[in-house]
Image (cartoon, grey):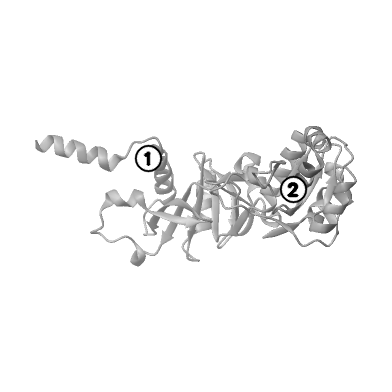
Amino acid sequence: MGLTARDLFSRKENNLKLTWWAGNESCKKTFTRLPYTYSNLGLVGYFNPTRQNQAQILGAAEIELLLEAEPAVMEDILHRLFKGKSAAVFICDDLKPPEIFKRYSEEYDLPVICSPLAGDHLIDQLLQFLSETLAENTILHGVFLEIIGVGVLITGQSGLGKSELALDLVSRGNRLIADDAPEFTRSTQNEIYGTCPALLKNFLEVRGLGILNIRKMYGAKAIKPDHKLELIIKLLNPSQGTSEGEDRSKLMERKIEVLGISIPFIPLAVVPGRNLAVLVEAAVRDHLLIKQGYIASKDLSKKQKKLMQ
């Protein structure tokens, strides 16, 4: 996914008080999402010849350094500044760029954009905008809830009762985030956040009852706008359940990859007579214990071995 300097300018012109000072408005160079092995600071920062940020910020110190440099040194610095892999050069603090910038802007097809904002503030605003705009995202089918403070996606085949289970969980004090098509976004190296499409906010479709407005039925506390995705519970037909011979201690190690991040995954067979809401809450509580370092199966195994000695 790419974002041109003109796209950024059009969307943030008023908010950041931007002025298009030089450069071809149809320039095809783009800001691109960085691999998550790198810091997002690679998107934007003060100009450093050894670090090619995609948005190069020049303030009073950088401009002064350029103007005081010997002609040959200035040419070398400008060559590095404009020839790199940047998508735009930003001048902050309401400064006027040196006229020589126009020549380099045309030669290397790199826009120069000015803002009266202080450098650190401009960097923060651009970093937030670029991180959010270039973040990876996906839509997963299921119901996303906050259960005992944990972001849980309940998924599975149609007709297994995901929405009925979600309604039961909400009635027990948990909170609905999104039904049917929650949107998930990876904006940092190890975190994915889920939210609800605007059209579907507050609504839950339950088989036999139709569309329900959870906010109006249970109040604002029953709704959460977003949450970090921390656990996935997949409802299964009994025939899809885990085999009886499977090592139960291995169940906690199951994970599924979402946007490149491994998320703990629990398969839960839907069997008549099982209280799924209680089981899901128990799974979430056990997940929290595991995060704290306590694993019940290992604790039991230790006690058994100690008893046998």
Q: Which residue is mark 2?
A: 81
Residue 172 position, x and y percent, is 50, 42
Residue 129 position, x and y percent, is 72, 46
Q: How many labels sit on residues?
A: 2
Amino acid type at circle 2 is Leu
Residue under the point 66% across and 41% down: 220
What secondary structure is marked by label 2?
A: helix
The answer to whether 293 appears left or right of 247 in the picture is right
Which part of the image, by quadrant, shows the N terminus? bottom right
Residue under the point 47% across and 56% down: 257
Viewer-proximal residue, 12 or 209? Answer: 12
Which part of the image, by quadrant, shows the C terminus? top left
Q: Which residue is mark 1?
A: 290
Residue 109 position, x and y percent, is 80, 58
Residue 90, image quadrant: top right
Say whether residue 10 is visible. Answer: no
In this rendering, which labeled residue sits more in front, label 1 or label 2?
A: 2
The answer to whether 175 appears left or right of 200 in the picture is left
The numbered disc on residue 115 is none
Viewer-proximal residue, 158 or 51? Answer: 51
